[in-house]
Amino acid sequence: MKIVQRFSVYSFILIFLVISSCSRNPVTGKKEFMLMSEGQEIEMGKSYDPQVTATYGVYQDETLQAFIDKKGKEMAAISHRPNLPYEFKVVDSPVVNAFAVPGGFVYFTRGIMAHFNNEAEFAGVLGHEIGHITARHSAKQYTNQMLGQLVFIGGLVVSEDFRNFADLANQGMGLLFLKFGRDNESESDRLGVDYSSQIGYDAKEMADFFNTLKRMRDDSGQSIPTFLSTHPDPADRYNKVRQMADEKQSENPNQQYKVNRDSYLRMIDGIVYGEDPRQGFVENNMFYHPELKFQFPIPQGWRLNNLPIQVQMSSDDGKGMMTMDLASGTDLTAAINDVIQKNELTVIDRSNVRVNGLDAVAMISEQTAPSANESQPTTLRILTYLIKYEGRIYKFHGLSNKTDFNRFFGNFQNTMQNFNVLRDQSKLNKKPTVIRIKPVKKNGTLQTALTSYNMRGTELKELALLNGMQLTDQVKAGSLIKIFDEMRSGS
Ligand SMILES: [Zn+2]
């Protein structure tokens, strides 16, 4: 694993220095300086895909996955690069975003799927993301980001357990915050209009979705998706997309463009909205995991990042970090030996302990990591706890540079020694909020319709945005709207 990691780091340097060449852009047809061949783009996408799914998890909904796969492939077939090995996935994140990785990998979050109000809005954003791939925007962007990360990955964190931290935190999460230049975004908007029109959707809906995003930012100060953030004036973008859609549609004045509102809404009925507490949540500096039934405290002021394969915490200055995940096997001695061996640790102290009545091993060790500058290796000091609970072994690492270790030791110890069985029923039973699709009972305002389903207070404003309407807008009896509900047990 170590060798593979270092190889990949150096291979990016090679790509930059050696393989860069001129090629023709598939969208513009112009010759341009490219850092990667198509084969390399595909390889890159394939190597990132497992990281994306490890970072966010794939959202478990076969109907939704089948839908985006079908529409994605239909659109890819009419795009400028129909022959890439496209893959389309809904990832399990509440954040509202969509992003594309070179080689044909396109991701939508469940958060953005919950915000669309019809298939045409979705198709516009799908076209925009496919546009980044076909016009090779992301390929260029990616190379820049990778080069920026070389020092950190090559220099500090290399061994298996700790590498996840750097990889996932910087690359996987970084994908959500990828930024493209304004020209790239405009080009992708145009391609979004083109591609979605070509598969029969009304591209004007894409403009309406930009309005929803703008409201999201203005109303609630939520962070805005990257495909909006590089544009200082979303209203201007709205107008441009409207205009491009009108022009495109005037080419075929007799064609009926689809919106498909009801079928889209019925498909997302029951979609999880916001954080999913079943996968772990934080309350008053305590992390709770209802499914695995454990809890542990988080140091004051630390950030927590809850990924499907690992919980990560870092101090505000970024110099101390903790990870928690599952060790392999069920035997504590075998597991600690495996940790020592895999990470090439030098053991300083090791003892069998009890953590709230559970069998555990505590260990202090050091790891000397080769740095970018081979003559000055970095020494990490690590506190490790392996705790056996319900047939699983939970593995905590707290690590920092040797010189900072004493500063963080108390934090590390407090978190690990207070790992405990979760018994609080209110925490165990915490269910996610889901979106339900309901018919409006009688003609009136959206507010009246929502209130008739017992929606109250701040929910109303949030639901107005989710429905892409104002509370004062008129809705007709029998038309469909989104409301909030609690996920029922067993579903
Ligand atoms: Zn974009």
Image (cartoon, grey):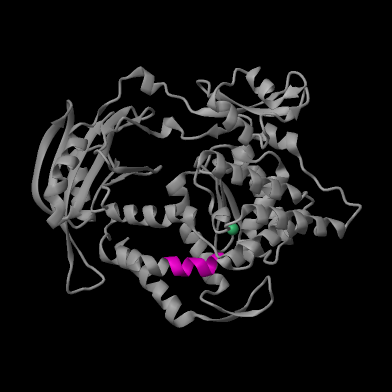
The quadrant where residue 326 appears = top left
Q: In the rendered image, which quarter contains the C terminus?
A: top right
Count of numbered circles in the view:
0
> Residue visible at 77% across and 23% down?
478
Residue 190 visible in this rendered orientation of the protein: yes
> Residue visible at 31% across and 63% down?
153
| Ligand number 1: quarter of image | bottom right
Residue 84 visible in this rendered orientation of the protein: no
Report x, y in % for residue 40: 51, 70
Above or below — where is 460 with respect to 58? above
Report x, y in % for residue 62: 60, 38
In-image side of 273 versus 483 (left or right): left
> Is residue 140 within the magenta segment?
yes
Chief secondary structure of the magenta span?
helix
> Residue visible at 58% across and 37% down?
61
Q: In the rendered image, which quarter contains the N terminus?
A: bottom left
Report x, y in % for residue 103: 56, 63
In-image side of 158 versus 175 (left or right): left
In-image side of 391 versus 466 (left or right): left
Above or below — where is 459 with respect to 366? above
In-image side of 103 versus 431 (left or right): right
The quadrant where residue 449 appears = top right
> Is residue 316 within the magenta segment?
no
Report x, y in % for residue 81: 67, 66
Above or below — where is 478 with respect to 243? above
Above or below — where is 93 with respect to 149? above
**What span is colored magenta in the figure?**
138-145
